[in-house]
Amino acid sequence: MLNQFIAIFEALNVLFWQDPTAQTIGFIALFVGISGFLHREDQKLKYYLTAFTFLMAIHFFMLSLWTAALLALLGSARNYVSSVTNNVWVMSIFIVVAWIITIPNSSEWVQIIPVVGVSFGTWALFKEKGLRMRFFMSLGTLCWLSHNHLVGSIGGVIIEGLFLVVNARTMIKLFKEQQSQNPPL
């Protein structure tokens, strides 16, 4: 167990020093994203996610990961637009564009998992609120977590794992608030 822990840190160290600027931007994005999932207000979460995904787009561009960068840039626009409208046609455009970006650039089934996650996240941001929004976002996070694990992205697993935990924590708080405002008869 200790050897695995050390191996993870050694791998992260190697990744960091391959492009420290890009990785620093990734770490900043991580903290922005975690801060967003700590908020119980949907609007604040959307603003934080806009900044998080924009930073991730920069991170992916710097690492020459073009499909991920385009999906993150699209996600940043999606997050912001979802804060000003919940129009089903606008939501549909974001989902269709994500699939159009992904399908031609996919050579293995594992590359489809993130766009499924993007689709869950898009639905959540445009059509859901509160607990339901965070539940659908968790489904998207699980897709990204699975993808990152399957492709061997240690940093990606850490980010998505932390998002899952922080989002679950916030969901529990929201559930308790709902229960205290609507006690059973």
Image: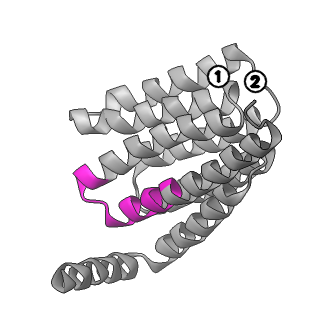
Region rendered in magenta = 149-164
Q: Which residue is pictured at 82% across the width and 41% down the height?
A: 181
Q: Which residue is pictured at 54% across the width and 24% down the height?
A: 95
* Residue 98 picture location, percent across and down: 49, 29
Mark 2 and 1 residues: CB-CB less than 8 Å, in contact?
Answer: yes
Give the residue type at disc 2: Asn
User: By what rule are the colours in the image chosen?
Assistant: one colour
Q: Quadrant of the N terminus?
A: bottom left
The foreground one among 181 and 71 is 181
Q: Is residue 17 left or right of residue 125?
A: left
Q: Which residue is pictured at 16% across the width and 84% down the height?
A: 3
Whether residue 18 appears in magenta in the rendering, the answer is: no
Whether residue 158 appears in magenta in the rendering, the answer is: yes
User: Relative to residue 59, is residue 65 depicted above or below?
Assistant: above
Residue matched to label 1: 91
Q: Is residue 64 left or right of residue 58?
A: left
Residue matched to label 2: 86
* Residue 16 picture location, percent across and down: 39, 78
Instruction: Rate crowding at label 1 as few (under 14), some (14 to 19) or many (20 or more) other CA atoms within 10 Å.
Output: many
User: Relative to residue 118, is residue 34 depicted above or below?
Assistant: below
Instruction: Rate crowding at label 2 as few (under 14), some (14 to 19) or many (20 or more) other CA atoms within 10 Å.
Output: some
User: Relative to residue 184, is residue 4 depicted above or below?
Assistant: below
Decide if residue 136 is in sight here.
yes
* Residue 27 picture location, percent across and down: 53, 72
